[in-house]
Amino acid sequence: MKLILALCALVALSECLRVPLIKGKTVREKMKEKGLWEKFRKTFPYNPTVKFVQDGTESLTNDADLSYYGEISIGTPAQTFTVIFDTGSSNLWVPSVSCSDEACQNHNKFNPADSSTFQNASEALSIAYGTGSMTGYLAYDTVTVGGISIQNQIFGLSETEAAFMASMTADGILGLAYQSIASDDATPVFDNMESQGLVSEDVFSVYLSSDEEEGSVVIFGEIDSSYYTGDIYWIPLSSETYYQITMDSVTINGETVACSGGCQAIIDTGTSLIVGPSSAISNINSVVGATTDEYGDAIVSCSSIQSMPSVTFTLNDYTFTIPASSYVSETSGSCITGFSGSSDSLWILGDVFIRNYYTIFNRENNSVGLAQLA
Ligand SMILES: *[C@@H]1O[C@H](CO)[C@@H](O)[C@H](O)[C@H]1NC(C)=O
Ligand SMILES: *[C@@H]1O[C@H](CO)[C@@H](O)[C@H](O)[C@H]1NC(C)=O
């Protein structure tokens, strides 16, 4: 650890322990461009919380709106992959050379035979998605994230992948949530960073820029004061599974529009929208002036963004207010809100929320910190 930190200090500390993220096109955007979206949505109705359905084989991210990804490497010598840094799941997996599905054709694939540090765990892995599944096996190897090499990291290698993954920009997923929800109880990457003494503080933080190419970052082991201004507002976790917290209410112009009396929410970098129970979300969408189309997208006129109200989320008595310019997005000329309904009672504060704050995941005292962007 000392050696790594010393080397980083020589190179420039800011280059170490952090991974720049790129905001890529989502499956939704890619399919819309190709004119395939309506057909896809008819076949697979929107169900963003499907990743949270626990059925023994943990369900992960199926969301058509995953977008922020960064680079990691696995093996000796290093093989490079792009992965979604997902605080809503806990496993790391990438495609393997034994996968011949369409989704594996246009992604980087790990070749165990090319890595001298590879060890097979010889344990099957299966992750169910709303639109199909990923199956494969677990293995151990050196995984390098943000310049830090983690020894003997357990990770998944896919042998089959669902067709929709062909439209995913990233090769795989790196889960940053707790081991308690990891498939096959695999030790997550951040837990190994801690136990191998690779991070000086038991925290990681995320800044998601609206800029497609620049600025977004995951920082491991420190809170970087250059990303925020004012106080950090700490919210204790209500469950150490996802980064789950208690939300007090959702209000618009001082009126409660959802989550009256409190509700549970998770802070999830791996979901792009703000998701809540259907009736609550319909209420928010109708108060902001959106109409829901047959695919469940909440449409607004792009020209009315300036007159739409802000939406306020109260967490641990602190208020976090998201303006319309931030919760409405434009894709191929049409505007949709970032509020999406699901059949689950759990709320997901995804990228639409996280983009507004420097977000700290504090594992030392199991809390999430939110601070105003610098
Ligand atoms: C690792 O083990 C799994 C399950 O036992 C097997 O299917 C796979 O082919 C093995 N991979 C290598 C590279 O040996
Ligand atoms: C967690 O730690 C931070 C930073 O040390 C501290 O300011 C905060 O009050 C703590 N939060 C909780 C919920 O204990």
Image (spheres, helix red, strand yellow):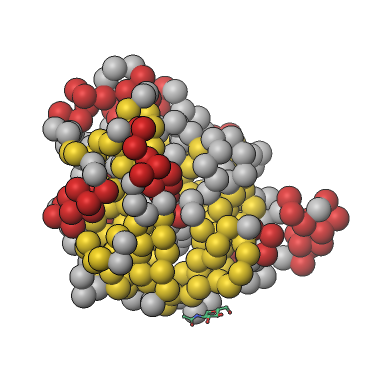
Q: Is residue 280 left or right of residue 171?
A: left
Residue at 44% across, 23% down? 106
Q: Residue 134: horizontal and vertical position, in percent?
A: 31, 39
**With respect to residue 318, does 33 lie above or below?**
above
Residue at 18% across, 57% down? 280
Residue at 28% across, 69% down? 249
**With respect to residue 354, does 370 lie above or below?**
below
Q: Residue 306: horizontal and vertical position, in percent?
A: 40, 42
Can the viewer see residue 369? yes
Residue at 34% across, 52% down? 309
Q: Quadrant of residue 262?
A: bottom left
**Residue 93 or residue 49, whichever sits in front:** 49
Q: Residue 3: horizontal and vertical position, in percent?
A: 79, 62
User: Quarter of the image containing the C terminus?
Assistant: bottom right
Work out which residue is located at the far right of the displayed protein and give it.
Answer: 10
**Residue 181 or residue 160, whichever sits in front:** 181
Q: Residue 128: horizontal and vertical position, in percent?
A: 25, 45
Can the viewer see residue 179? no
Work out which residue is located at the far top of the displayed protein and give it.
Answer: 34
Q: Quadrant of residue 227?
A: bottom right
